[in-house]
Image: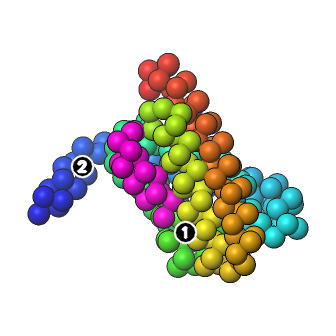
């Protein structure tokens, strides 16, 4: 009962501006993905590495930025849910019904990481960790559920995903610091 009341209170606190930010950042994440995937795919395709392992860090930064701007639990998960729904109707990034799992899990990972560490995308360390974890989770799901990668390429792609995700977290933190400077 307590959780239901907390959820209802959180929903009531969500403003139209929050929803607009979530929509904008979800769209930026998908746009980043559609631009980067073909460019990075040229390099990673021949190495049997999921493209998202390398490019993913740059589009995992958007849910981290959303969490940092809104400072609300569930912001990253909401962005991931919006992206999952959009991916079902778009020609890129569509894994069928698995899209819900593949897109939603990184958002849940970001929210869980920031909840457990009691951070709110407030510093370099938490942005780095949240984005790296999200990219590792997304890469692991694609590697296991979609590509059925053998163990060695999967582990290698997860290491690349952590590095790329960390880079995305670094960029997310830089964006959040600049947003704070201008009063957002």
Choose between 176 and 131: the one closer to the eye. 131
The image shows residue 82 at horizontal and vertical percentages of 47, 59
Is residue 128 depicted above or below 180 in this figure?
below
Residue that badge 1 annotates: 102
Choose between 85 and 44: the one closer to the eye. 44
The image shows residue 55 at horizontal and vertical percentages of 71, 53
* Residue under the image location 54 percent in, 77 percent down: 98
Q: Which residues are magenta?
A: 105-120
For marks 2 and 1, the one nearer the N-term is 2
Choose between 109 and 64: the one closer to the eye. 109
CB within 8 Å, label 2 to label 1: no
| Residue 165, magenta (yes or no) | no
In the image, which disc is placed on residue 120?
Answer: none
| Residue 107, magenta (yes or no) | yes
* Residue under the image location 61 percent in, 68 percent down: 140
The image shows residue 6 at horizontal and vertical percentages of 18, 53
Element type at mark 1: helix
Q: Name the dominant secondary structure of the magenta segment.
A: helix
* Residue under the image location 57 percent in, 45 percent down: 61
Q: Quadrant of the N terminus?
A: bottom left
Q: How many marks?
A: 2
Residue 52, quarter of the rendered image: bottom right
Element type at mark 2: helix
Give the CA separation, mark 2 to mark 1. Answer: 25 Å
Residue that badge 2 annotates: 10
For label 1, the crowd category at 10 Å Cα-Cα, with few meaning under 14, some 14 to 19 and many 20 or more, is many
* Residue under the image location 43 percent in, 59 percent down: 108
The image shows residue 103 at horizontal and vertical percentages of 53, 64
For label 2, the crowd category at 10 Å Cα-Cα, with few meaning under 14, some 14 to 19 and many 20 or more, is few
């Amino acid at each position: 009962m307590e959780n239901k009341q907390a959820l209802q209170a959180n929903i009531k606190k969500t403003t139209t501006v929050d929803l607009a930010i979530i929509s904008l950042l979800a769209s930026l994440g998908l746009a980043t993905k559609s631009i980067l995937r073909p460019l990075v795919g040229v390099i990673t395709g021949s190495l049997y590495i999921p493209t998202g392992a390398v490019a993913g860090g740059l589009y995992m930064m958007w849910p981290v930025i959303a969490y940092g701007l809104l400072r609300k639990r569930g912001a990253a998960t909401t962005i991931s849910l919006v992206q999952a729904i959009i991916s079902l109707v778009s020609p890129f990034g569509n894994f069928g019904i698995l899209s819900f799992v593949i897109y939603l899990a990184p958002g849940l990972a970001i929210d869980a990481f920031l909840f457990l560490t009691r951070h709110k995308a407030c510093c370099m360390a938490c942005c780095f960790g949240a984005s790296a974890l999200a990219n590792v989770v997304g890469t692991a799901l694609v590697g296991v559920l979609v590509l059925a990668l053998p163990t060695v390429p999967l582990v290698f792609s997860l290491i690349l995903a952590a590095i790329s995700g960390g880079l995305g977290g670094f960029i997310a933190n830089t964006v959040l610091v600049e947003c704070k400077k201008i009063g957002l």
